[in-house]
Image (cartoon, helix red, strand yellow):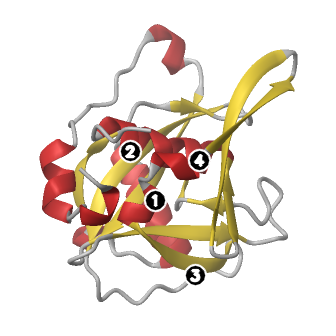
Amino acid sequence: METHDLTLDDFLSRFQLLRPKMSRDVLNRRQAAVLIPLVRREQPGLLLTKRASHMRKHPGQVAFPGGAVDSTDASLIAAALREAHEEVAIPPEVVEIIGVLPPVDSVTGFQVTPVVGIIPPDLHYHASEEEVAAVFEMPLSEALRLSRYHPLDIQRRGHDHRVWLSWYQHYFVWGMTAGIIRELALQIGMKP
């Protein structure tokens, strides 16, 4: 299937539902969750943010709404929904959760669980000035085109890492965000 022909129904029929798995190793890491908001349209979109430039961690980077799990969160999904509401005013009750992707280890010491959800097309986003500089939508078919992601092998803290890089319009999408989008594409069987 060509990515430009991808509808939301096609995506949903190919998405493999996963539940977060907790192992002894995972319980010792700080937990975080991000929402991967898929915008329900004839040609679905992927909602992304650009973090505010004054942020202490990851300033100016393209990211999904999300953050650390706190004591009020009943689950990883609840954390992703709370953060999406705080950062871009997505009401939790309008998000249709369809599953999660495997957790990803961040360079800041968090294990991040990507939560995939569908949001209505008519939402009015309100970016939190403290955290978000911009909110934008990328066509899902474009986001899931694996050939747009380029690997870069780096060494950090004595360990080899592969990071993924891409551009969309004037936004540089890289690191964990690009890796999560790429994993989403692989999850539904897209081919490089």
Q: Earlier in the sequence, mark 4 or mark 3?
A: 3
Residues at marks 3 and 1, CA–CA distance in whole angstroms: 22 Å
Q: Earlier in the sequence, mark 2 or mark 3?
A: 3
Q: Earlier in the sequence, mark 3 or mark 1?
A: 3
Q: Give the residue at mark 4.
A: 149
Q: Amino acid at mark 2?
A: Ala
Residue 123 at x, y percent in the picture: 34, 86
Residues at marks 4 and 1, CA–CA distance in whole angstroms: 9 Å
Q: Secondary structure at mark 2?
A: helix
Q: Secondary structure at mark 1?
A: helix
Q: Give the residue at mark 1.
A: 143
Dot 4 alpha-carbon crowd within 10 angstroms: few under 14, some 14 to 19, many 20 or more? many
Q: Give the residue at mark 3.
A: 127
Residue 126 at x, y percent in the picture: 52, 86
Q: Secondary structure at mark 3?
A: loop
Residue at (45, 79) in percent of width and height: 89
Asked if labels 3 and 2 touch by Cβ distance under 8 angstroms, the answer is no
Quadrant in which the C terminus appears:
top left
Q: Secondary structure at mark 4?
A: loop
Q: Earlier in the sequence, mark 4 or mark 1?
A: 1
- Does residue 27 lie above or below 38 as drawn? above
Q: Nearer the viewer, mark 3 or mark 1?
A: 1
Q: Amino acid at mark 1?
A: Ala
Of 20 and 18, nearer the camera is 18
